[in-house]
Amino acid sequence: MDYETIIGLEIHSQLLTRSKMFCRCAADYTSASPNTHVCPICLGMPGVLPTINRKAIEYVIMTALALNCSIPEFTKFDRKNYPYPDLMKGYQISQYDFPIGVRGHVTLEMGDAKTISVTRREIRITRVHLEEDVAKLVHRDIPWGDSYSLVDVNRSGVPLMEIVTEPDMRSPEEARQLLIKLQSILRYLGVSTCNMEEGSFRCDANISIRPIGAKEGFAKAEVKNMNSFKAVFLALEYEAIRQRKVVEQGGHLIQETRGWLEEGTTVSQRSKEYAHDYRYFPEPDLPPLTINPSWVEEIRSQLPELPEIRQERLVEQYGLSFYDASILTSSKPLADYFESCMKLWQGDDQERKAKILSNWLLGDFAHLLNENNIEIDESRVTPSHLIELLKLIEEGAVSGPAAKKIIEDIFHTGKRAGDIVVQQGLTQITDASDIEVTVKQVIGNHPQAVSDFILGKQQALTFLVGQIMRMTKGRVNPKLANEVMRRELEKLC
């Protein structure tokens, strides 16, 4: 029997507010010593009263609008009761039946974007709500066998936004792509850093299988402990295969929570045959909130251009391919960098220039950034640096191979392209008489390649031209090198 995979996600994202959700402690705790960003409120001391962080509410409204959600006028906070060492009060202030955002959607673009063979799938957003993060447990092992746990309360009370989807995804790849898209949207909005490795962007996934065409499926598993996009994909792929094997071998799937291990498996953590009773009830220390529609519209008017809209504009404005535009707009700093460069490179034939620039940003420059693990807005190569180099190439002042060396030098030193060209003597050779001696040296040094060319092997010419480029350190115009070498070889023929 054939089965389909059913996946829904619960995404938690810490918000970039200066203070915590219900007190005035600083929310930037990542580099702080343990238990230094604390007060009686986030320590859960008796008799303290929380107050609501207005900026956190605004950020959740921004996000909900960006995800095409409706914003009800009425919302409230609730107490979610469960005993756990990282929950100082014994309950978490969250939202239950009246969240801030409801009934949204995100469009996924799946397929081979390079050939424009793209299918679009709409993933429904159930709700976007706001709660407080919990403390962090730090586990320690003792050499003689015992272990213990410490509690760092710095994270407790940091504003935490939860985005819950409907079970609309049908593959681990769709789940991965949705996470990537949501991360991009939140970073465009500036509401979260969304760094999974730091824990500011976290994901739990509910996954089950059902026979093709059936309305009901088997029991679902909730998968936790996934701290990267790759981990989400691998965990869900493993779990989908595991569940199919259990059913096909006559086993029984139970509703449970499973944890992902980096070794490549999921393991059962606890059974969830019965729903956990969190005993939600309205938070008595916080008033219900009425969200004024005029405030919502004011926030809507201030939303930035989001990735999907920006992608469409770049395709229309600069004639970029869907693939190039989708990669450029996946990161706001990258898209901003591209547009800053285009403003500096004005003139005719903007589509041609946009394609050249895109090739550099997604090719050699991207390789340097990835190799050094830095973002484009942290690089020494400013838009003016890159455009100066591209203009030198366009004017014929430097060759393509020399330009690759120059971009590396700019990247590591921050020097201007023109200065590097002068200092290292990288001006492109465009006069045939200037390379005739080099050409004759190459012919004399490689008699076998010359013989191969005379016998009709055209690839020998490519090799010989490559030797010219090597001897001149890439300074020769490749077309000129090809022409001069061919002319000299034909004389020998």
Image: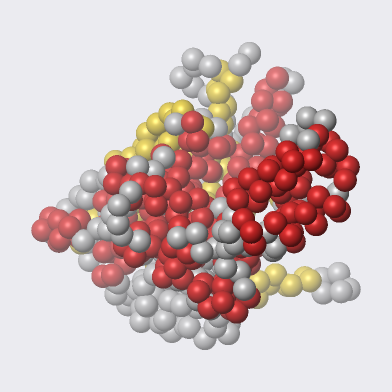
Quick check: 208 left or right of 311? right
Q: Does residue 124 appear in the picture of this structure?
A: yes
Q: In percent of the image, x 15 and y 56: which residue is there?
A: 297
> Looking at the picture, how far across and down is residue 363, in whole percent?
56, 53
Does residue 342 sit above or below 54 in this rendering? above
Q: In percent of the image, x 70 and y 56: which residue is there?
A: 436
| Residue that extends furthest to the front in the rendered view of this protein | 491
Locate residue 227: give its quadrant: bottom right
Q: In percent of the image, x 73 and y 38: which residue is there?
A: 490
Q: In which quarter of the image is the N terminus?
A: top right
Does residue 433 sit above or below 118 in this rendering? below
Nearer-the-camera pick, 459 or 297:
459
Q: In percent of the image, x 54 and y 83: which residue is there?
A: 32
> Looking at the picture, how far across and down is residue 69, in whole percent?
27, 46
Nearer-the-camera pick, 193 or 285:
193
Colouring method of the image:
secondary structure
Locate residue 23: give its quadrant: bottom left
Q: Quadrant of the C terminus?
A: top right
Locate residue 116: give its quadrant: top left
> Looking at the picture, how far across and down is residue 149, in whole percent?
68, 72
Does residue 463 sit above or below 388 in this rendering? above
> Looking at the picture, how far across and down is residue 290, in whole percent?
16, 59
